[in-house]
Image: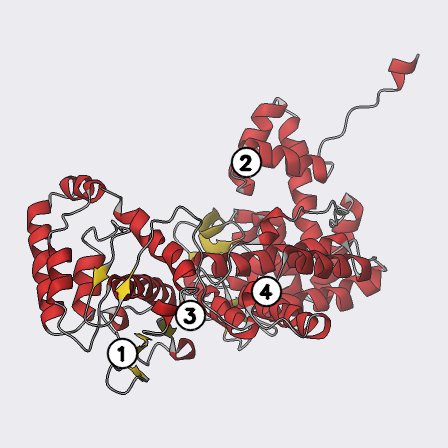
Amino acid sequence: MQSIYHYLTLTTEIEHDFEHDSKVLNLFSSPKIYTAKGDLSKRWYIYFSFRNPKTGKLERMANVYGKVNQYKTKENRMSILSSYRKNLLFLLKQGFNPFIDNSELYEQLKNHTVDIELEETLKEEAISPSKINESVKNAVKEALDENMITSLLENVILKGDLSKTTKKPIKNNQKEIHIKEQNTGNKNQEEMSIVKAFDFALSLKEKAVSSGTIKDYKRKAKLFIIWMEETHPTKKNIREISRKDLLDYFNGIVLKTSARNRNNYRTELGSIFQVLKNNELVAENYIQSIPVLKSKTERNKVYTLKEQQNIFEYLEKQDQLLLLFIKFVSYSFIRPIEVCRIRIKDINLETKTVQFKAKNSPLKTKIIPSILFDELPDLSKLDKESFLFTPETIGAFWDANETNRRDHFSKRFRKVVKDHFKLNEDYGIYSFRHTFISKLYRKLRENASPFEAKSNLMLITGHKSMSALEKYLREIDAELPEDYSKLFK
């Protein structure tokens, strides 16, 4: 007996041949998915038409809702409707006809038993296959007796094994439909425009990434769509985009800007195309096979001890709020954008710790060393929901997204510090993180081996592995050799 999981893909394999079979195609239209343009407040469903034997015309049938609208995310709804659509097409090809008595079809389907692979799963979950099989038969009878397919789709197809196809035709009062065994790849003939496909993928991505990331995704998607319209105006369907089209687009970016920028576009468009592939709107995510180009590494330079001291002394007189912001980066080794995320409620005054969303972690906890904690004002009476850092004061509300908040302090640093000390683009607030990690590592090395020093440092910086820390230290040249002049003598 074929696997239920194989069945779920086999229906789309059959679909390809079916859509080229004029005898079958004339009976009904291929089922389509209605998503209300991604609006979860509206009902989503499957719709199709069937030829009325009396008038000879295709007539719209009742929408298939099932339980799809009980789900509250676009990903779940689309997944359920995709399964409904495949299985509805399977039933129609088996001979289901909403205008006639389907008793004969019922007799042929009702004796199918639960899939062997599914039985093993049910055993693990302590569910009786016999009970499931009985519910399968009852659901088939109920659905066919009432000439309704919703219960069949929900209770039979997704739980029982109706995947075994045959070359023997199933007869009804109108046609003989031949279902062939297929061994070809999975193909979905769903048609969707490029714009609608990207809108759909972005609506799903919006639930999984931050507002700043989705904004960047949308910008890059819009630029790619504009490029497609200008260079390939005849290509309207998302499935028409080829690997060569994507290569041409990425090559254009690297020629105009840089390999680094091209790689960023590759990563984000690749993520969007992966959503399209997962939802069977494209056959392949070609971007996965397009290599990453080697690019020049951009980094913030480390300040010398003298430069760092001069900047701190200058800010003590000119901008103490900016200085405290920099000290959070310097002493707690928190990235500038992470500092901008901190609210008063994220600081535990008793344990002297702070929690925040880090680059590679949804929630990270770090201690606030006394050298920094002692400089904080009294936070106990401030609103817990307010931000720690705002343009004017500590502990206030700031109506701006985290990217704009970070940019405010970057521009402020450029105006107050960089212009005054005539620092170039290689220096920024992030440079202080590199500077103080280098300083701390060299201090630890005075009385410890390299491995011991790195082990202690890893706990402080928050690097997830020794190899990641070692790579970071190499990049910022934290460890330098002693004078080796005597080796030349």
As shown in the figure, which amino acid type bears the numbered disc 2? Answer: Met
User: In this rendering, which labeled residue sits more in front, label 1 or label 2?
Assistant: 1
Q: Nearer the viewer, residue 211 or 149?
A: 149
Q: Nearer the viewer, residue 186 or 293?
A: 186
Marks 1 and 4 sit apart, C-alpha to C-alpha, by 29 Å
Q: Which residue appears at 36% of the width and 69% of the height?
A: 23
Q: Quadrant of residue 443?
A: top right
Marks 1 and 2 sit apart, C-alpha to C-alpha, by 59 Å
Q: Quadrant of residue 463?
A: top right
> Disc 4 vs disc 3: Cβ atoms closer than 8 Å?
no
As shown in the figure, which amino acid type bears the numbered disc 3? Answer: Glu
- Read off the residue under disc 4: 240
- Read off the residue under disc 2: 458
Label 4: few (<14), some or many (≥20) within 10 Å? some
Left or right: 461 with respect to 136? Answer: right
Give the secondary structure at mark 2.
Answer: helix
As shown in the figure, which amino acid type bears the numbered disc 4? Answer: Glu
- Read off the residue under disc 3: 385
Left or right: 135 with respect to 257? Answer: left
